[in-house]
Image (spheres, grey):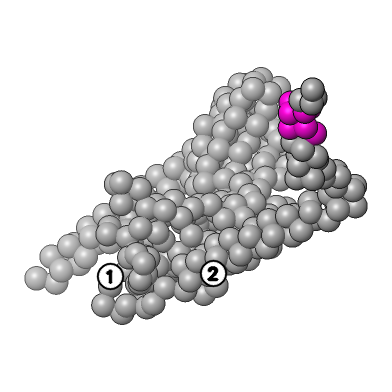
Amino acid sequence: MAKKKDTKKSTHKYTDSSMRSKVEIKQPLSSNQEKISRLVGSVFIGLGVLLVAFGVFSYIKYREEPLLNPELEAPILEEVTSITNGETIMVKGSANGYDNVFIYIDEEKVGETKVNEESKFSFEQALETEGEYMVTVAGVKGFPNRYISPKSESMISIIDRSAPNPDMVTFKYGEETNKDTFILVGTTEPDATVEVKRGTQSFEAVADASGNFRIEGVALDEGKNVFSVYIEDLAGNKVLLDEKVRVAYSPSGSVNGDAVVDSNIPQAAGTFDQLIGNNLMMLFGILALMAFLGSSTFVYFKNRR
């Protein structure tokens, strides 16, 4: 009797052989290959960033150079810090119809600022060097084509960090008085503020355009009074003078007036009463002389008749 073949065993044999021939086993990438892949990826990312940065730069550069339109009306420059001893100046104004305003100092652009909903703008600029600066502004509008207006009328800003010169200051006052106040007059740099101070008491005045100042009603205590004097210019620079103002007050003293030595103010020089007395005597003498001459002339002409 013939033996039957084991067909199941034969089928599994061919199937396993076929699967082995089709399965491919991949080896993991080496560390060097992984590094190279990361490096290439980083290079492409870097190139992308550079391209974006170049685009942004080109856009900003284009915006910095708008086309001049001479028919546009210039913004109004309303306020510029006139004089200061600080590090910055403030620029303010109105620019109706504009998106931005360019700021120029001595014809050179130093920055730009946005115009708000009320058509107002403000800009703060640092200045390191003392001196006089000319400030102007121009309006910019439009997108993508941008246009710039002509420059506004200029305004001057002064940076002054030098203290007032004490050698320019002079005083006139009397050193004695029988009043409880005195007057200090003198000269300093134009428009400076002069402050006379003793303890918590302070008295001040502003010099005129010629530098002349006058401080009235400076209070005195009985006895000797010593005052310090401060000079402050328009920029805010302040200096304390070495020279002191010294006034002696005695209610029973013989010096009249406010203790200021000034030939144009007789009372302040303490000679008011004396001058009045002398003038009255002179007036009476003149009247007596005129009366004498008049009566003599009348008698003379009467006798000739």
- Residue at x-position 75% and y-position 45%: 22
Dot in front, 2 or 1: 2
Q: Secondary structure at mark 1?
A: loop
Is residue 215 depicted above or below 222 in this figure? Answer: below
Residue kind at label 1, given as amino acid type: Glu
> Please, is residue 116 above or below residue 211 in the view?
above
Q: Which residue is mark 1?
A: 73
253 vs 238, nearest the viewer: 238
Magenta stretch? Answer: 5-13
Residue type at tag 2: Ser
Position of residue 290 in the picture relative to residue 257 (left or right)? left
* Disc with the residue nearer the chain's start (2 vs 1): 2
Q: Is residue 34 left or right of residue 209?
A: right
Is 38 part of what is drawn in magenta?
no
Within 10 Å of the Cα at label 2, are there few (<14), some (14-19), or many (20+) other Cα atoms?
few
Q: CB of mark 2 within 8 Å of CB of mark 1?
A: no
The quarter holding residue 126 reads: bottom right
Q: Nearer the viewer, residue 218 or 1?
A: 1
Measured as percent of width and height from the top left, residue 193 is found at 57, 45
Name the residue carrying label 2.
Answer: 58
